[in-house]
Image (tube, grey):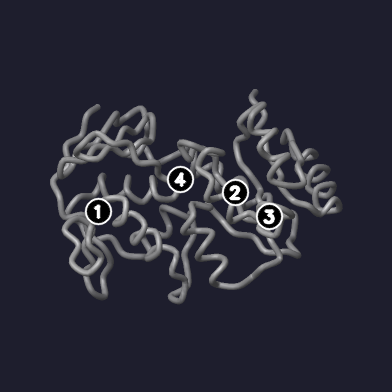
Amino acid sequence: MTVDHILIVDDDPEIRGLLTRYLGEHGYRITATADGREMRRALATSAPDIILLDLMLPGEDGIALLLDRDLNPKAHIPVIILTARDETEDRVMGIELGADDYVTKPFEPRELLARIKSVLRRARHLPPNLAPEAVRSYRFAGWSLDVRARELFTPDEVVISLSGTEYRLLKIFLDHPRVVLSRDHLAEFVYGKKISPLERGVDVLISRLRQHLGDDARKPALLKTVRHEGYRLDADVEVEY
């Protein structure tokens, strides 16, 4: 049986020790690092299944590390932000940059463990109609999405890197073209949980996806806003199995 590998990036030795012991006792293999430099060395050695990333790090902070796509070129590694900063702006920024979840300190280890399991489950076990082996690629409005490589290609065959959350959001639209999807529906699929009416995570992801697709936010041609209802992908989709 394969053991899931968690990479912890936190400059607090007590938290690193606590998480190493607790998560290790629950069957995970742990690599604990204190900053971005150690994180880079760990990633060069082996790719973890998930990263727990503190925002307030010495040197490069967590936001800078999330921005560095060279650390995670195909955005395959899920990231949970783990930080003492509980500002809405920080949560939105983390989601915008591709983090899969956000946990604030002080935290309950059992809650963090549940979040880790949930994020790993979402990353690996998609519903049957979204399973990678079921669909190889999608084509829409000149664009294409390679499901196995998780790469988006422009009409000119330029590769665009998507974060894990951006990929899941685009995927659900491609499986439901010309169907209005509510914010709650999208949040349930992308994050695995409901969000409050004040949370802007889905709207931020829509904005990011529109930027990738070159869609004018003021008058979008592909990802359209349906007032008081949600969003709709306004394109025909060809599926290759």
Q: CA distance from mark 3 to mark 1?
A: 32 Å
Identify the residue under disc 1: 214
Picture quarter with the C terminus: top left
| Residue located 50% across and 42% down the image | 69
Q: Nearer the viewer, residue 65 or 9?
A: 65
**Considering only vertical position in the picture, is 223 above or below 195?**
above
Q: Earlier in the sequence, mark 2 or mark 4?
A: 2
Q: Which mark is residue 54?
A: 3
Q: Are marks 3 and 4 in contact (CB under 8 Å)?
A: no
Q: Earlier in the sequence, mark 3 or mark 4?
A: 3
Element carrying mark 4: helix
Identify the residue under disc 4: 164
Q: CA distance from mark 2 to mark 4?
A: 15 Å
Q: CA distance from mark 1 to mark 4?
A: 19 Å
Q: Earlier in the sequence, mark 3 or mark 1?
A: 3
Q: Are marks 2 and 4 in contact (CB under 8 Å)?
A: no
Q: Are marks 3 and 2 in contact (CB under 8 Å)?
A: no
Q: CA distance from mark 3 to mark 4?
A: 18 Å
Q: Closer to the observer: label 2 or label 4?
A: 2
| Residue located 28% across and 60% down the image | 181
How dense is the environment of label 4, judged by Cα within 10 Å: few (below 14), some, or many (20 and up)? many
Identify the residue under disc 2: 65
Element carrying mark 3: loop
Residue type at tag 1: Gly
Q: CA distance from mark 1 to mark 2?
A: 25 Å
